[in-house]
Amino acid sequence: MDWQTTLRWTLRTVQDNIVRQPVTYEFRTTVIQEYHTWESFEEIGRWIRGGEKYFLQSFVDSRELIGDEINGCEKAEMQAFAEVIRLYVPNVDPCGM
C-alpha cells in the first residue's frame, strides 16, 4: 500500500470514528505551498464532509528544517482554499489570516 492510500485510509478511519462520537472536534491542515493545490483541498473537503470545524494554518518556516524548499501560502491563496473547503465544511477558518 503506498503512502497516499495509507493516508486516505487513516483519515477516513479517524473521520468516521470522530463523527460518530458525541464530542467536539476539529480538523486542521498546515498548508504548504509546494504540496497543496485547489484539487487537494477538493479531495480533503470530500473526506471530511460534514465536519464541525476545519482550520487551515499556513506553514511557517522555523529555520530548523533540513531543506529549504517548503513555503507557506499567502493570505489570498489561503482564503481561496478556505472557499473550496467551505463547500463541504461550512465552518472553516484560515488561522492567522
Image: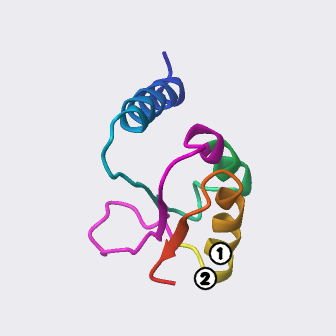
Give the overall secondary structure of the magenta segment.
loop
Q: Is residue 88 above or below residue 6?
A: below
Q: Residue 85, percent across and down?
A: 65, 57
Residue 59 part of the magenta-drawn span:
yes
Q: Is residue 59 left or right of residue 79?
A: left
Mark 2 falls on what kind of element?
Answer: helix
Amino acid of disc 2: Lys
- The part of the chain drawn in magenta is 44-71
Q: Residue 33, percent across and down?
A: 58, 65
- Residue at figure coordinates x 50%, y 22% from the top left: 2
Rendering colour mode? rainbow
- The disc placed on residue 11 is none
Q: Residue 58, percent across and down?
A: 48, 71
- Residue at figure coordinates x 37%, y 30% from the top left: 17
Q: Is residue 51 left or right of residue 23?
A: right
Give 46 or 74, whichever is nearer the viewer.
46
Give 83 or 40, whichever is nearer the viewer.
83
Q: Is residue 51 left or right of residue 74?
A: left
Q: Residue 51, percent across and down?
A: 51, 48
Mark 2 and mark 1 in contact? Answer it, CB < 8 Å: yes
Amino acid of disc 1: Gln
- The disc placed on residue 79 is 1
Quickly name the residue at label 2: 75
